[in-house]
Image (spheres, rainbow, N blue to C red):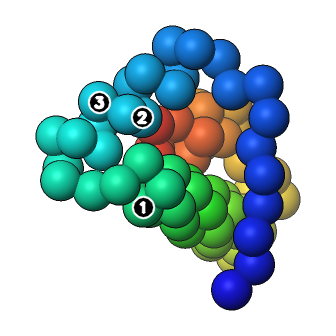
Amino acid sequence: MANITIKNIPEKTYQLLKERAKRNNRSLNSEIILSLQLHAHRSDENSNRILELARKSQALGKGSLTDAEIKAAKNSDRE
């Protein structure tokens, strides 16, 4: 496994991660790894959804996505 060092984490972010780790009975390191994994997978899923919408749009002869379709795809994984 790879190791990374993260510098200059904003204090509020650090405290939120620390609180969430405690709430979930995890170490801070485990909480950070899980957060990174979830974010990375969510980004991949969102990219795949946008690509799928683009392909469907092209198949229908539109040639491009509407602003509403792009906005919906961008916001689909945001909480």
Q: Is residue 8 left or right of residue 72?
A: right
Q: Secondary structure at mark 1?
A: helix
The one nearer the camera, 20 or 51, is 20
Asked if residue 61 shows in the view, the reply is: no
Query: Where on the picture, by quarter, is residue 27?
Result: bottom left
**x, y percentage for residue 5?**
78, 52
Cβ–Cβ below 8 Å for labels 3 and 2? yes
Q: Is residue 20 above or below residue 25?
A: above
Choose the circle earlier in sequence order: 2 or 1. Answer: 2
Q: Say if 3 sits above or below 36 in the image.
A: below
Q: Residue at x 75, y 78 (%)?
A: 2
Task: Name the residue nearer the viewer: 57 or 52.
Answer: 52
Given residues 77 and 10, the one toward you in this image is 10
36 relative to 38 in the view: left or right: right
From the image, tell me which residue sits under label 1: 30
Where does label 2 land, which residue?
17
Residue positioned 53% across, 23% down in the render? 13
Percent from the top left, x then y, of residue 78?
A: 45, 37
Q: Which residue is mark 3?
A: 19
